Image (spheres, helix red, strand yellow):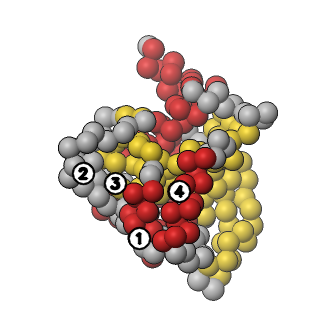
Amino acid sequence: MLTQNSLSTTPVARLLEGSRVYLRPINVEDTELYYNTLFHQEVRRLTGTQRSFTKEQIARYIEGKGQDASSLLLLIALQEDDRVIGDIALQDMDSLNRSANIRIAINEQGDQGKGYGTEALVLMLDYGFGICNLHRIELNVFDFNEKAIRCYEKVGFKREGVQRDALFYNHQYRDSILMSMLQHEYRNRYVKQAEN
């Protein structure tokens, strides 16, 4: 439930910009915003979040992410009004194997299905492959999250396998689907297409 309108005259730092969304760094000032998201029931279900957190834990988490060279956590905001609609992260970046994990959450149902997540994913993939020189970016998605699966396939992720009974949530076990994209697949789909 990340929602925020920018009321200050200070320009918002924008790391990556698309036509409808931009990705900005998360700061300790965003603690309340991020904390509230962790108690949004649908976000918890779709992400498999099982634990509860305090605001102090969230503030420390955000501070830690700023110091962690193996991850990049960004907020997704709308170009039209600076409203934060979700977050996206490259995690577990491995410089030897040139690999990472990506995750994304668009928090409100009213913001889902509008292409915001697709645009944010392509921005972060471009950063991962084009700036961080990654070779492989993978993700996990729970089998009941059909909207997300369609989005990932639309972006170009390929299914690799299924982790059976990987999540226990709401009295039942659910499978996790492993998907990935390789650097050349991204370039063929997005970079070469843009050049033509």
Where does the image place residue 130, in percent across and percent down from the top left?
A: 57, 26
Note whether 190 is above or below 25 in the view shown.
above
Q: Mark 2 points at which residue?
A: 6
Camera-nearest label, 2 or 3: 2
Residue at the far right in the pictured view: 96
The residue wearing badge 1 is: 36
Residue at image location 43% in from the left, 20% down from the top: 194
Helix or strand or loop: what does disc 2 sit on? loop
Q: For the residues marked 4 and 1, what is the alpha-carbon distance in whole angstroms?
A: 14 Å
Q: Which amino acid does label 1 sit on?
A: Asn
Kindly identify the amino acid type of the residue bearing the numbered disc 2: Ser
Say which of 65 and 188 sits in front: 65
Q: Please indicate, yes or no, whether residue 151 appears anywhere in the rendered image.
A: no
Q: Earlier in the sequence, mark 2 or mark 1?
A: 2
CA neighbours of label 3 inside 10 A, class few (<14), some (14 to 19), many (20+): many
Q: Which of marks 4 and 1 is in front?
A: 4
Instruction: Specify few, some or many for label 4: CA neighbours under 10 Å numbering under 14, 14-19, or 20 or more.
Output: many
Residue 84: where, in percent of width, then height?
A: 34, 54
Residue at the spot of label 4: 62
Query: Which residue does the image show at 41% across and 43% down from the upper left?
Result: 24
Q: Which of marks 3 and 1 is nearer the N terminus?
A: 1
Q: In this view, does 90 lie to the left or right of 1?
A: right
Amino acid marked by disc 3: Val
